[in-house]
């Protein structure tokens, strides 16, 4: 009845003077659709954080610095700075055909804070080499459990962002096996590093699905940094990169 989480994370966490967000419920569609995880948060964070990078580019400013300039929440700023340090943001642009991108969100606007720096190699195909993740879940009860949850979510989000897509014709879903519905292979899994920001005086909010949206955004922004072209549709396949380069 509430739209199935369509508006989850649709409101940016940045301090802009005028914000208007509208969620539209589509009651009739050719196929029933839902989400594996995060409901609307994955796509909404990808869209917001991609556009934040475009705004930073238009303003001639570093994407990290631009975000920090529009964030008043000290915990949000802290996870961005921690991810940037872990992900060696200062080395951005040091290698040819390698891009670095950043993504940030507070899950549901009230849960865990998470920032991701992605290192992407774009030569014959898009390959995520490394993900540096900083997360603030409030009081940490089980540090190893939080890391495991974040690492798993980051790998799953990488698979969504680069590979996964439901295909269908006019009658049915056609991606019914692992050939027609590809997922990330073990050989393609990036190195994932996680740093935890302990807030013992804050309530625990859980690690859950906090990393998915920021990971997608960081990868998309890293591809744009590496190739100077932006792919706005997911997954970010070689075909879509080539189409964007030809536009």
Image (tube, rainbow, N blue to C red):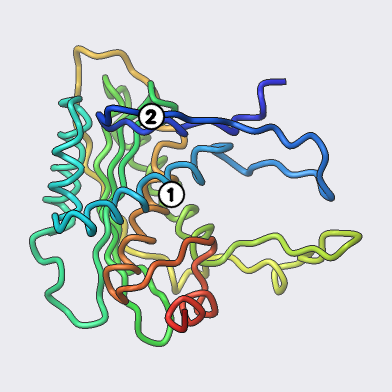
Determine contact: label 1, label 2, CB under 8 Å. Answer: no
Q: Residue furthest right?
A: 171
Relative horizontal placement of residue 27, taking residue 171 as reference (left or right): left
Quarter of the N terminus within the rendering: top right
Work out whether 58 lies above or below 127: above
Q: Which residue is mark 2?
A: 19
Q: Which residue is mark 1?
A: 46
Relative horizontal placement of residue 209, taking residue 65 as reference (left or right): right
Work out whether 244 lies above or below 53: below
Which residue is pictured at 47% across the width and 61% down the height?
Answer: 232
Task: Name the foreground residue: 37 vs 21.
Answer: 21
Which residue is pictured at 38% across the width and 48% down the height?
Answer: 151
Q: Residue furthest left?
A: 90
Q: Residue 158's x, y, as percent?
A: 45, 59
Q: Residue 156's x, y, as percent?
A: 49, 53
Q: Secondary structure at mark 1?
A: helix
Q: Residue 52's x, y, as percent?
A: 30, 48
Relative horizontal placement of residue 90, taking residue 155 as reference (left or right): left
Mark 1–mark 2 distance (CA, rounded to whole Å) = 17 Å
Res. 97 image quadrant:
bottom left
Q: Residue furthest bottom?
A: 124
Which residue is pictured at 28% across the width and 24% down the height?
Answer: 140
């Amino acid at each position: 009845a509430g739209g199935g989480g369509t508006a989850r994370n649709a409101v940016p966490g940045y301090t802009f003077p005028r914000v208007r967000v509208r969620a539209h419920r589509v009651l009739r569609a050719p196929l029933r659709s839902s989400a594996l995880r995060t409901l609307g948060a994955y796509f909404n964070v990808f869209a917001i954080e991609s556009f934040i990078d475009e705004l930073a580019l238009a303003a001639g400013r570093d994407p990290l610095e631009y975000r920090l300039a529009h964030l008043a929440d000290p915990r949000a700023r802290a996870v961005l700075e921690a991810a940037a340090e872990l992900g060696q943001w200062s080395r951005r642009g040091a290698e040819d055909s390698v891009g670095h991108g950043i993504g940030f969100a507070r899950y549901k606007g009230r849960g865990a804070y998470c920032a991701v720096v992605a290192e992407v190699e774009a030569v014959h195909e898009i390959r995520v080499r490394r993900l540096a993740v900083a997360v603030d879940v409030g009081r940490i009860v089980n540090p190893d459990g939080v890391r495991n949850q974040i690492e798993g979510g980051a790998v799953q989000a990488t698979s969504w962002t680069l590979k996964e897509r439901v295909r269908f014709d006019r009658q049915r879903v056609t991606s019914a096996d692992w050939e027609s519905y590809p997922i990330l292979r073990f050989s393609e899994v990036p190195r994932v590093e996680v740093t935890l920001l302990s807030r013992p005086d804050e309530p625990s909010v859980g690690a859950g699905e906090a990393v998915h949206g920021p990971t997608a955004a960081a990868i998309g922004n890293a591809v744009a940094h590496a190739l100077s072209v932006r792919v706005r549709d997911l997954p970010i396949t070689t075909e879509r990169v080539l189409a964007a380069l030809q536009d």
